[in-house]
Image (spheres, rainbow, N blue to C red):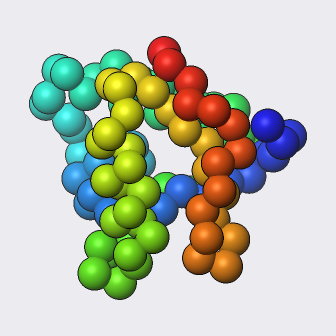
């Protein structure tokens, strides 16, 4: 993995983006460990932006979200999107 200090994350779930940015409180106790992991990972970056993108306007975000639902709960995949093409930077990590 690269030694990056700044990152942008785009997601198509507005609720998840709001939870990750601390704008709303998540009441689903099953998601609490994942949201805690997001907070932990945010602290690893000097700047981390988590932004919402509408699914209809970005098929890549939609494809990545579908791919994410196929992984085991607790699995994290690090990918980079360049010119609309996603490539995996590291194998999935299981928490």
Q: Quadrant of the N terminus?
A: top right
Q: Residue at x 84, y 42 (%)?
A: 2
Where in the figure is residue 47, as x and y percent of width and height? 68, 50
* Residue 52 visible at all: no
> Quick check: 39 above or below 8?
above
34 or 80: which is nearer to us? 80
Res. 92 visible in picture: yes
Residue drawn at x 40%, y 78% is 58
Quadrant of residue 46 in the image? top right
Above or below residue 84? Residue 47 is above
Count numbered badges in the picture. 0
Q: Quadrant of residue 84?
A: bottom right
Residue 26 lies, with reference to residue 56, above or below; the image says above
Residue drawn at 54 percent across, 56 percent down: 9
Q: Is residue 79 above or below residue 69?
A: below
Residue 94 place in picture, x, y as percent: 50, 19
Asked if residue 66 lies left or right of residue 88, the reply is left
């Amino acid at each position: 993995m690269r030694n990056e200090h700044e990152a942008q994350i785009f997601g198509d779930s507005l609720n998840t983006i709001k939870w990750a940015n601390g704008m709303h409180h998540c009441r689903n106790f099953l998601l609490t460990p994942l949201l805690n992991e997001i907070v932990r990972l945010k602290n690893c970056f000097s700047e981390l932006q988590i932004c919402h993108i509408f699914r209809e306007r970005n098929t890549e975000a939609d494809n990545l979200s579908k791919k994410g639902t196929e992984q085991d709960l607790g699995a994290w995949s690090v990918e980079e999107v360049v010119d609309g093409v996603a490539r995996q930077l590291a194998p999935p990590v299981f928490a």
